[in-house]
Image (cartoon, rainbow, N blue to C red):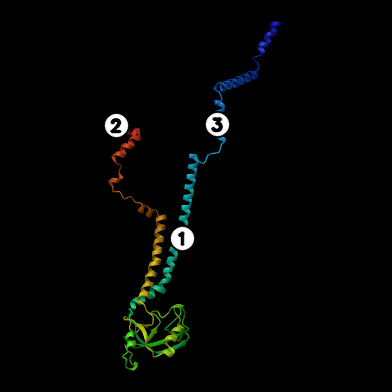
């Protein structure tokens, strides 16, 4: 009976797997604790330092943070440049469109009168004129022409028609040595008198009521300076300045066209691939486009396979 009992106890011990696993884990824990104990406080300090390093916040002076900041600043700068390029492109496009419309607007009001004035070839030295007739008319049928008109495109319903005689004697000479009007040999008689080369203008520089009071009505027969056309002698005007005419012509031609050319040029350089390739074309000669001997040697040192193949040959 005693033998059988001892046998059962020995055979029943290996049958409990849970006990062996617990004992195995306990032995591993005790082994690790003994190793840590023999090594001193190095294991605890290492694990503590790793935890503190993982849990501590990133310092501002570290290289990673500087790289992130630099990348972020670069992205912000690129974004700012893209916005500036977009708004500049909008402004340049608007400038180009406005330049075209401005030039088209200036053609009938500034360019054409200035060119007509140059073609008429007015004498810059004022000569002597007198008004011999002043007609004030109303109605479209009666106003076929007018010495002064406020608005070059408006219809004529009221008009002042002035007729003059003029002589080529300079007005400055006439003032120094006045002559009897009955004895003067007039070069052109009873011709139309206009306020300027077009016979029209816009307020406030052109006021037909003041113009009529200045030359007509009670001033008929009084000498005054005027300008005649050397190309068309029957044309006489009251206002003329070669400098002002040329000044306005140059400004009306240069400013809109220069703004248009600059705007289109910048936009073409930014958004036209052909223009960008032409502008960034390399200036090297044909021989300089090939790599040098030193560059080939350096390249072969980097690539061992190619260097081996060259050694074989």
Q: Quadrant of the N terminus?
A: top right
Q: Label 3 belongs to which residue? A: 49
Q: Nearer the viewer, residue 181 or 305?
A: 181
Q: Which mark is residue 311?
A: 2
**Which secondary structure, mark 1?**
helix
Q: Is residue 105 left or right of residue 53?
A: left
Question: CA separation, marks 3 and 1?
Answer: 59 Å
Where residue 29 sits, quadrant-wise, is top right
In the image, the segment drawn in magenta is: 88-94
Q: Is residue 1 above or below residue 216?
A: above
Q: Is residue 26 above or below residue 70?
A: above
Image coordinates for residue 164, horizontal then vertical, percent: 37, 88
Q: Earlier in the sequence, mark 3 or mark 1?
A: 3
Q: Nearer the viewer, residue 59 or 132?
A: 59
Where residue 149 sits, quadrant-wise, is bottom left
Residue at 33% in and 87% down: 176
Q: Nearer the viewer, residue 290 or 212?
A: 212
Note whether residue 143 is visible. no
Q: Is residue 88 left or right of residue 303?
A: right
How many other residues sit within 10 Å of disc 3, few (<14), some (14-19) or many (≥20)? few
Q: Label 1 belongs to which residue? A: 91
CB under 8 Å between callouts 3 and 1?
no
Question: CA separation, marks 2 and 1?
Answer: 62 Å
Residue at 42% in and 71% down: 106
């Amino acid at each position: 009976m005693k033998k059988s009992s001892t046998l059962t106890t020995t055979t029943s011990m290996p049958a409990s797997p849970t006990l062996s696993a617990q004992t195995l884990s306990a032995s591993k824990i005790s082994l690790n604790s003994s190793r840590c104990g023999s090594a001193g406080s190095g294991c605890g300090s290492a694990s503590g330092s790793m935890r503190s390093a993982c849990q501590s916040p990133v310092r501002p002076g570290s290289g990673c943070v500087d790289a992130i900041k630099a990348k972020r600043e670069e992205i912000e700068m690129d974004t700012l440049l893209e916005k500036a390029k977009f708004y500049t492109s909008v402004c340049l496009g608007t400038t180009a469109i406005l330049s075209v419309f401005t030039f088209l607007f200036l053609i009938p009001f500034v360019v054409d009168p200035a060119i007509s004035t140059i073609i008429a070839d007015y004498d810059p030295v004022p000569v002597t004129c007198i008004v011999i007739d002043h007609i004030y008319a109303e109605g479209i049928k009666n106003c076929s022409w007018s010495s002064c008109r406020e608005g070059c495109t408006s219809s004529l319903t009221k008009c002042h028609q002035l007729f003059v005689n003029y002589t080529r004697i300079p007005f400055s000479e006439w003032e120094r040595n006045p002559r009897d009007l009955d004895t003067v040999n007039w070069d052109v008689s009873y011709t139309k008198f206009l306020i300027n080369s077009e016979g029209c203008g816009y307020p406030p520089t052109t006021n037909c009521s003041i113009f009529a009071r200045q030359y007509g009505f009670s001033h008929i027969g009084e000498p005054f300076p005027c300008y005649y056309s050397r190309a068309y002698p029957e044309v006489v005007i009251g206002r003329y300045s070669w400098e002002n005419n040329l000044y306005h012509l140059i400004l009306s031609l240069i400013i809109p066209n220069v703004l248009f050319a600059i705007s289109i040029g910048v936009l073409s350089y930014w958004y036209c691939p052909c223009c960008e390739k032409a502008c960034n074309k390399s200036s090297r000669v044909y021989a300089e486009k090939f790599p040098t001997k030193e560059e080939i040697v350096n390249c072969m040192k980097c690539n061992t396979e190619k260097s081996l193949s060259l050694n074989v040959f």
